[in-house]
Image: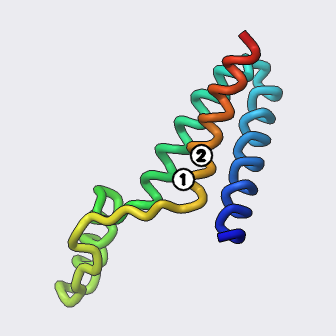
Amino acid sequence: MLRYALFVFITLIVEVAFIWGISFFIQTDLLTAMFFGSAFFIFFAFLTGSTGDLLSKNSEYAAYIATAGRYEPKYDKVTFRISPFLIGSILCMVVYFGLSYFMT
């Protein structure tokens, strides 16, 4: 449990630093960059944590075609894994809401 919490905290720190760096480099409002950046990270974490979606179905279909029909799909049902990346991204959005409350 401690290892999971450490990965969540590291993910949060890296995402906030990355968004802050982009905001500083492009010279935009930090809150706007935090909102769109954390929304993008949540969407990306959701895509990488799920199986059976459009991306994995297409890759399995390509493997099926490449092996001339001998490939058996591994992911027939949709599954979703809650990873530290997803939790860290959601916490990044919570940090955005906290900053927007205190900065305005």
Q: Report the residue at 43% width, 64% height from top.
A: 81
The residue located at (77%, 48%) in the rendering is 13
**Where is the N terminus found, in terms of image quarters?**
bottom right
- Residue drawn at (65%, 67%) of the image: 4
Whole-angstrom CA distance, mark 2 to mark 1, is 5 Å
Number of marks in the image?
Answer: 2
Give the side of residue 47 with respect to residue 63, left or right: right
Q: Secondary structure at mark 1?
A: helix
Can you tell which quarter of the image residue 3 is in?
A: bottom right
Q: Is residue 2 above or below residue 25?
A: below
What kind of residue is marked 2? Ser
Q: Are marks 2 and 1 in contact (CB under 8 Å)?
A: yes
Q: Viewer-proximal residue, 83 or 24?
A: 83
Within 10 Å of the Cα at label 2, are there few (<14), some (14-19), or many (20+) other Cα atoms? many
Q: Is residue 31 above or below residue 93?
A: above
User: Residue 93's quadrant in the figure?
Assistant: top right
- Residue at the spot 74% in from the left edge and 22% down from the top edge: 30
Q: Which mark is residue 86?
A: 1
Please state which of residues 6 and 38 is positioned toward the viewer in this rendering. 6
The spot of residue 31 in percent (x, y) is 68, 21
Q: Nearer the viewer, residue 81 or 55?
A: 81
- Tell me the colour scheme of the image: rainbow
Residue tagged 2 = 89
| Tag 2 secondary structure | helix
Q: Could you say where residue 29 lies in the image, as x and y percent from the top left? A: 73, 17
In the displayed image of the protein, which residue is found farthest to the bottom?
A: 70
What amino acid does circle 1 point to? Answer: Leu
